[in-house]
Amino acid sequence: MAAGPPPPLEPSPLPTFSEEGFVEKFVRKTRENPLVPLGCLCTVGVLAYGIICFKKGQTRRSQLMMRARVVAQGFTIAALVGGMVATTVKSRQ
């Protein structure tokens, strides 16, 4: 059972990507999944308002805002995971 020599191993060419700056990448990612930046902005806004209420001594409203912050963070995480699932499904097709 004499087999011929194995074929020569040639490295496959690496894909080339264009240089993408921070702004271009941010805009592209925001267009792919716009709910993540929206969730981040909501989280920061609720957090800032909660801190302001805490400094003013409005403890009840501050506690409410901290609970709302947790809900906003949950929304952001759900949007992030949903976007990853959608991207994975899209790339398989």
Image (spheres, rainbow, N blue to C red):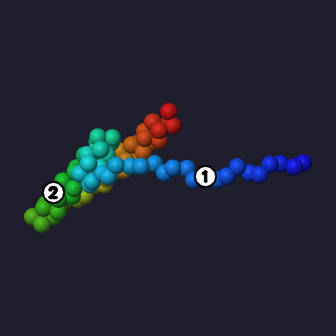
Residue 2 in sight: yes
Residue at the image point whose x is 48% and y is 51% from the top: 14
| Circles 2 and 1: CB atoms closer than 8 Å | no
Residue 66, image x, y percentages: 25, 58
Residue carrying label 1: 10
Residue 53, image x, y percentages: 13, 60
Q: Give the distance between the C-alpha atoms of the residues marked 2 and 1, in whole angstroms.
A: 60 Å
Residue at the image point whose x is 46% and y is 48% from the top: 15
Secondary structure beneath dot 2 equals helix
Type of amino acid under label 2: Tyr
- Report the number of discs: 2
In the image, 9 versus 38, the foreground residue is 9
55 sits left or right of 43 in the view = left
Mark 2, mark 1: which one is toward the viewer? 1
55 sits left or right of 13 in the view = left
Residue carrying label 2: 49
